[in-house]
Image (cartoon, rainbow, N blue to C red):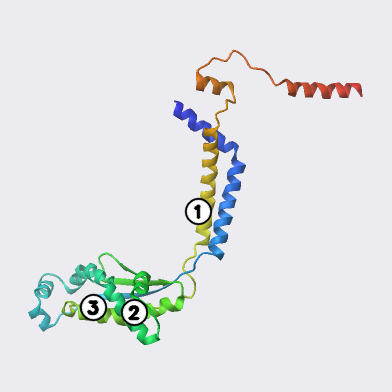
Amino acid sequence: MNTEIDLQKMLKLVLKKWKLVAVFCLIGALAVGIYSANFATKTYSSSVKFFVYAVETQQELSDSTLARNAASNTSKMNYAMQMMETYTEMLNTSEFAKRVANELNKKYSSNYTYKDISKSIAITTKEDTAIMTMTVTTNDKATAFQIAHQLETTVPKVMQSKNNGLLNASVEDAAIEASAPNGMGTVKKTILGFIAGGVIAVAYIIFRDLLDVRVKTSEELTTRYNIPVLGTIPEFEVDSRKSKKKSDKGEK
């Protein structure tokens, strides 16, 4: 019962201070919106979509037990899907990133490091498919496109060089240079700022009330200390003001 009363009290307190909550909401929305639109770091992405498929040759079938099993027990497509996770991990290695960086540096006389490549690439696969998407995200759209475009050549070469070339990859969607920054999400961030401002305001109101040890009403005195209230002193000051106004009117 006490919990319900406390919750009701807090709700009434917050509703009573709705103007303060509204001000905090607006401040939060404006602050986050302005920051997102003018000061947040802009990023650009360029993606390459690959189709991964199994390569079946007579030499591979004779040299590899895994390939024989793939050919006899599952279709080439199923085999490719089964191996997707393994190859994804291989493309996440620093060795692969070093190869991409070296090829980029030769082509563009740039100075990429394997760390630059590793932190910019994200690989996603769709369940029950042999489709792999590699997304490059950087602070510069030209850089993102250069790296993504290089992946179109490097990824198939690396896959051919591993596991006797049992899996290969073809480019289904080539890289395109980003025409605009990634979803800045200014509107969404502004809404989050609005909500955050409201949460801060509500927390401030509640904690301020909890830290206030003053007794403001007779009901609060009874609730806190279990002391019966025999009577209360009326606000004579208000009444005296009213009577004074009446007497002033009478004199006139």
For the residue labelled by badge 2, is the local secondary structure a helix, a strand or a loop? helix
The residue carrying mark 1 is 192
Q: State the residue lying farthest toward the top.
A: 230
Does the residue at mark 2 contact the one at mark 1 (Cβ under 8 Å)? no
Quarter of image, res 55: bottom left
Instruction: Give the amino acid type for the residue marked by disc 2 in the picture.
Output: Ala
Q: Can residue 176 be seen in this view?
A: no
Would you name the residue on which mark 3 appears?
A: 159
Say which amino acid is labelled 3.
Met
Would residue 186 be seen by someone viewing this image from the given angle? Answer: yes
Q: In which quarter of the image is the N terminus?
A: top left
Q: Residue at 18% across / 80% down in the picture?
A: 165
- Which is nearer the N-term, disc 3 or disc 2? 2
95 horizontally vs 247: left or right:
left
User: Which numbered marker is on residue 233?
Assistant: none
Residue 109: % across, % down: 39, 86
* Between marks 2 and 1 in the image, the one whose residue lies nearer the viewer: 2
- Residue at the right extreme of this rendering: 252
First of labels 2, 1 by sequence position: 2
In percent of width and height, residue 89 lies at: 25, 69
Q: Is residue 90 above or below residue 224?
A: below
Q: Position of residue 245 (x, y in %)?
A: 83, 25
Q: Which structural element holds mark 1?
A: helix
Please tell me in which quadrant of the rendered image residue 62 appears: bottom left
The residue wearing badge 2 is 101
Residue depicted at 9% across the width and 75% down the height: 68
In the displayed structure, would residue 116 be above or below residue 11?
A: below
- Side of 38 where 155 appears, left or right: left
Q: Which residue is drawn at 19% across and 78% down?
A: 162
Give the image quarter of residue 39.
bottom right
Amino acid marked by disc 1: Leu
